Amino acid sequence: MLFRSTEMKKHRSQLLWRCVILISIAIGAPSVQGMEYIPLPSGTLNSALARDSDKLGQGPIVISAFSMRETPVTQKEFAQFTATHPQWQRRKIPRTFADANYLKNSENAKPNSAVVYVSWFAAQAYCESEHARLPTWDEWEYVAAADSTRRDARNDPSWLQRILGWYAQPASKALPAVGGEANVFGIRDIHGMVWEWVDDFNALLVDGDSRSGDDPEKLKFCGAGAINFQDRMNYAVLMRIALLSSLSADASTGSLGFRCVKDLP
């Protein structure tokens, strides 16, 4: 009960601050002119993550068409955003919205490298300035499943090993410029650059039973009740879940950036 109460309070707090973000963007400066958004077709995702246990075994998740930024948001783009929305500058942002690491060492970073040390709140605010939003976990995983020729390469051992090889590398002190090889959708740097925020990062280990039932032990071992380990792709997925679910919305790290998405008419 204590776990559920804490999660509900976090969720309500996050909704409240999202309203504050929307208001601040609405009365603030003009929108940031961002990178190209790539239209993505609708499709299905056989997700390794089942957050609602009653949905297990009921087939793939349907992903509606949407558009996504071609690359992660860069240092230069985020600096332009904070210049026109000064409430998101390092010295002015309230600690409620970002921890002490926010925009750490940004002045020494390459302008065209992915922005890091950005909190969920700040990432969401940036996306709102482009009339966009952060992707959901399912949307991000749908795009991340693709390689340069296939929409879903997750059953290819060599592709999976390449992803896991990147995860095993120590964090780089200096990130390269964005603009790596595109996947089949035309999206670049979704692997091999930085981890990325998703909108529902703090709900990844909360399934339907944990929100309405009475057994918090189901969540005790890193979502054991929600993860299916029979698929070879699941270890990479688990690593992403472990990182994101360990964070709070004000957290900022040197290996975590973001990109935005838009709903299509």
Image (cartoon, helix red, strand yellow):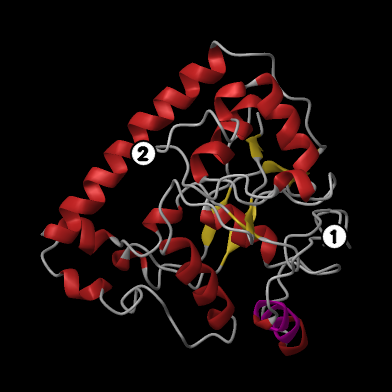
Measured along the vertical axis of the image, is residue 107 above or below residue 173?
above
- Residue found 47% across the figure and 17% down from its top: 23
Q: Position of residue 25 (x, y in %)?
A: 56, 19
Task: Tell me the quarter of the image containing the C terminus.
Answer: top right
Q: Which residues are magenta?
A: 160-167
Q: Nearer the viewer, residue 247 or 253?
A: 253
Mark 2: which secondary structure? helix
| Label at residue 14 | 2
Residue 88 lies in quadrant = top right
Measured along the vertical axis of the image, is residue 219 above or below residue 188?
below
Q: Earlier in the sequence, mark 1 or mark 2?
A: 2
Whether residue 254 is visible here, answered yes or no, is: yes
For label 1, count other residues whose C-alpha is less than 10 Å away and answer few (under 14), some (14-19) or many (20+). some
- Dominant secondary structure (helix, strand or loop) of the stretch shown in magenta: helix
Asked if the stretch drawn in magenta spans residue 246, the answer is no
Is 21 left, or right, of 172 in this rendering? Answer: left
Measured along the vertical axis of the image, is residue 68 above or below residue 90?
below
Is 113 left, or right, of 209 in this rendering? Answer: right
Is 80 left, or right, of 16 in this rendering? Answer: right
Measured along the vertical axis of the image, is residue 9 above or below residue 1?
above
Which residue in the structure is indicated by mark 1? 176
| Label at residue 146 | none
Q: Amino acid at mark 1?
A: Pro
Asked if the stretch drawn in magenta spans residue 164, the answer is yes
- Residue found 45% across the figure and 37% down from its top: 97
